Image (tube, helix red, strand yellow):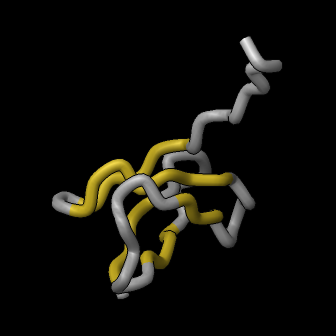
């Protein structure tokens, strides 16, 4: 299992060994939803908010 730093609260976040790029995970400390931007090097960022497109 790998670890990275939460970009919101700077806590250590555990990343499963089978994690994939673009996968969403939650920070156990602050609850922020994070996206795995890159696996090498391991990079996390705040997940974008999903916006409704209302069929447009």
The x, y position of residue 12, in whole percent, is 49, 70
| Quadrant assignment, res 42 | bottom left
Badge count: 0
The quarter of the image holding the C terminus is top right
Placement of the N terminus among the 4 image quadrants: bottom left
Q: 54 or 2: which is nearer to us? A: 54
Residue 33, position as x, y percentages in the image: 65, 53
Query: What residue appears at the point 41 percent right and 56 percent down from the top-left corner?
Result: 36
Query: In percent of the image, x 68 and y 53: which residue is there?
Result: 32
Residue lying furthest left:
40
Q: Residue at horizontal 67%, vertical 72%?
A: 28
Residue 56 left/right relative to 48 = right
Left or right: where does residue 45 sit relative to residue 27?
left
User: Percent x, y for residue 31?
Assistant: 74, 60
Location of residue 26 in the rendering, given as x and y in whole percent from the top left corner: 64, 64
Work out whether residue 9 or residue 38 is closer to the camera in this orientation and state it: 38
Residue at 70% over, 34% down: 50
Residue situated in front as seen by the camera: 3 or 40: 40
Q: Is residue 51 left or right of residue 12?
A: right
């Amino acid at each position: 299992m790998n670890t990275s730093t939460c970009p919101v609260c700077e806590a250590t976040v555990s990343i499963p060994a089978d994690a994939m790029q673009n996968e969403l995970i939650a920070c156990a400390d602050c609850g922020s939803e994070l996206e795995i931007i890159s696996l090498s090097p391991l990079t996390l960022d705040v997940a974008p908010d999903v916006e409704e497109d209302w069929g447009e």
